[in-house]
Structures are given as structure tokens and as C-alpha cells.
Amino acid sequence: MTEPAVIRALAVTVSNRAAAGVYADKSGPVLAELLRAAGCTVDGPVVVPDGDLVEVALREAITAGYDVVVTTGGTGLTPGDRTPEMTRRVLDREIPGIAEAIRSAGAAAGIPSAILSRGRAGLAGATLIVNLPGSSGGVRDGMAVLVPVLRHAVDQIHGGDHPRPA
């Protein structure tokens, strides 16, 4: 049996203030470490302000051939939170179950505001893109949902089949 391919991942922090140097990025390093713990090779976190530069970062990641791009931040209700809209611009197909499960897990963990996240998940070419909330806790909760299905999702994106019993 061959070793499974390493998943190439990019962590992207979306924060106007962190991008401007007002404060340090806290959720991006947590995200990168959780991706590494899941067995991914990880670049980033890349820190970008919300808005059009999110779309630019996502398109560059797709062109670079990342298997997965996970963003943190920009998914809330403030007027400046535009990450879901920028993500929608690059997606070919949405995977609503991932975003729904992330919101549900947060709410079940006693975070009622988790249902306010507008994060999306989907495919852009052969790249899985998942939006997580901007808090370190939201990143931990979201990755607890994503990690168990990440390898299977990437395998399927690259043409793999469902595992079959022997």
C-alpha cells in the first residue's frame, strides 16, 4: 500500500487590523498549527485585509496548486466582513455541509453566536476552500469538524473513491 500524498495547505488570516499592524495575528498561527497536526504541509498564515485582497489571495492559492486553503476571519456581520462574498467569487462548487457542520458544532459547544458566522466552503478547481471565524476558539472548533473529513475530501477531489470494506 502506498503512503497517502501529503496535503498542501495554506492558512489565510483575514483581518484589517492585523494586516495594518495594529495587533498581532492570533488565530492564523493556531490554524497553521492545527493543519500541521492534521498532517498537512502548511504555508502561512498569510495576513490580508478583508475585501478584494481576499479574492486575490484565494486565486493565487488556487494557481499555486494548494489542496486546501483555510481562512480565518471576515465571516461575521459587520459591514467590513466580506470573506464569504470573496470566497463565493472563486468557488466552482459549494460544499454547504462543511460550513453548516462548523456552525452547528460551535452552537452545540455553547457558543450561540456561532450561527452568525457566514463562512462558506467549496471547491475552486482542485482546491478545497473553507472559511472559519476569526477567533482562536472558532478556529479550534472549526478544525475539529474539518480534520476528520479533510483527507477523504482531498482524496475525492483528486479522483479517489469512497473507501470500501475488504
Image (tube, rainbow, N blue to C red):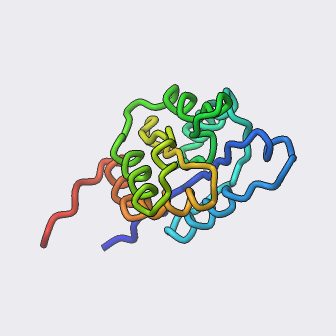
Indicate the quadrant containing the C terminus: top left, top right, bottom left or bottom right: bottom left
Q: Is residue 58 visible?
A: yes
Image coords of residue 46 (percent x, y): 71, 48
83, above or below 37, in the image: above
Is residue 53 toward the left or the right of residue 154 in the image?
right
Q: Quadrant of residue 31?
A: bottom right
Check the image and report above or below for 164 versus 86.
Answer: below
Residue nearer the viewer, 129 or 1:
129
Residue at x 56%, y 66% (from the top left corner): 34
Residue lying at 73% horizontally and 46% vertically, measured from the top left: 47
Q: Where, quadrant-wise, is the N terminus in this rendering?
A: bottom left
Residue 109: image location, x then y, percent: 44, 63
The residue lying at 67 percent from left, 48 percent from top is 13
Q: Is residue 150 visible?
A: no
Residue occupying image coordinates x 59% and y 47%: 71
- Is the residue 54 above or below the residue 134 in the image? above
In the rendered image, residue 117, in percent from the top left (x then y), is placed at 51, 43
Image location of residue 118, percent across then percent down: 50, 38
Does 4 sit left or right of 49 as displayed?
Answer: left
